[in-house]
Amino acid sequence: MTEPPYQRIVADLRRRIAAGELRPGDRVPSTRQIAIRWGVALATATKALATLRTEGLVRAEPRVGTVVAEPRPAPPAPAAPVVERELTRDRIVRVAIEIADAEGLDALSMRGIAARLGGATMSTYRHVAGKDELIVLMADAAFGEEQPAGPGAAGWRERVETGVRTLWALHRRHPWLAHLSPLTRPLPLPGLLAHSEQILAALTHAGLDPVTGFDVQILLYSYVQGLAVNIEREAHAQAATGLSDEEWMRRQDPAMGAIAATGQFPVFARLLETFATDGFDLDLDRIFELGLRLMLDGLPVSDMVIE
């Protein structure tokens, strides 16, 4: 009988871990890399990583990916099958969020989730209709992890800042949230609407009419979403190239220097000289705070508004 493709992948990675080629803490290939390297489907790659997790050889590291686990004192006992009564929608959603946090939405599959839970793929469909419904449930749960602050005695601006910073923190924690859907096709998410309600209430208190307030709320959300997209893109770029952002930038130095030397971009050339001396750290959190301040400073709010 021909060995299933996922078992060949598991055997190869298991051998590399045993031989010390992959050490504890080292990243193992992502599902996408496995799919390309072994010429298999993403579902097969997901099953291979799930098998290694069950064996205790690898673990998911949020915003990093799958890494080699610390060796255990004794070989782990085979995982006992999960009794069907223990398989709940909440557990499915929780495991799905863990997978998406570590490897992105592309790595998500009902088969992979079932493997993580020790159950059959079809058993997950008794609780969730499919991947589309699952992603909606995941997003609602993720947005619900932080409760909006009550109105309290804070002024409108502080309430808006608190609401937007909370959304930024959630997107930082779960980068896949930035890839859910376009603004023109909003999902019915009570967890997200609770944060929007806080921001809209504060903007209304600031004196903005309903249309302007809603437009500003959309602008603020899209600002968070637009910055957060870069978090997962960087993770994917590191997985694909094996280079950190700093290593990648160092490789671009000759090309950037050549462009600056043409004299066509004097401001850019002066920036490169400054960065060469003082350095530059592209800090998304710093940029987020700068953009939030500039947007709120520009709101058409009456001077007569009472905080």
Image (cartoon, rainbow, N blue to C red):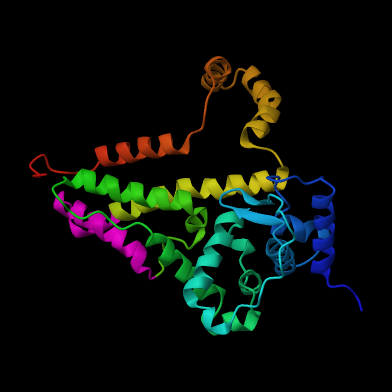
Is 211 included in the stretch rendered in magenta? yes
In this image, 203 relative to 16: left or right? left
For the residue pair 154 and 25, the one nearer the viewer reads as 25
Residue at image location 85% in from the left, 48% down from the top: 19
Q: How many marks?
A: 0
**Image coords of residue 57 (percent x, y):** 72, 56
Q: Residue furthest front?
A: 73
In this image, 115 relative to 168: left or right? right
Residue at image location 53% in from the left, 72% down from the top: 92
Q: Which residues are magenta?
A: 188-215
Residue 185 visible, this orientation: no
Q: Residue furthest right?
A: 1
**Image coords of residue 125 (percent x, y):** 57, 82
Q: How would you classify the magenta stretch by its main secondary structure?
A: helix
Query: With respect to residue 13, does 251 lie above or below?
Result: above
Quadrant of the image occupied by residue 13: bottom right
Residue at image location 53% in from the left, 83% down from the top: 85
Rendered-image quadrant of the N terminus: bottom right
In this image, 12 relative to 132: left or right? right
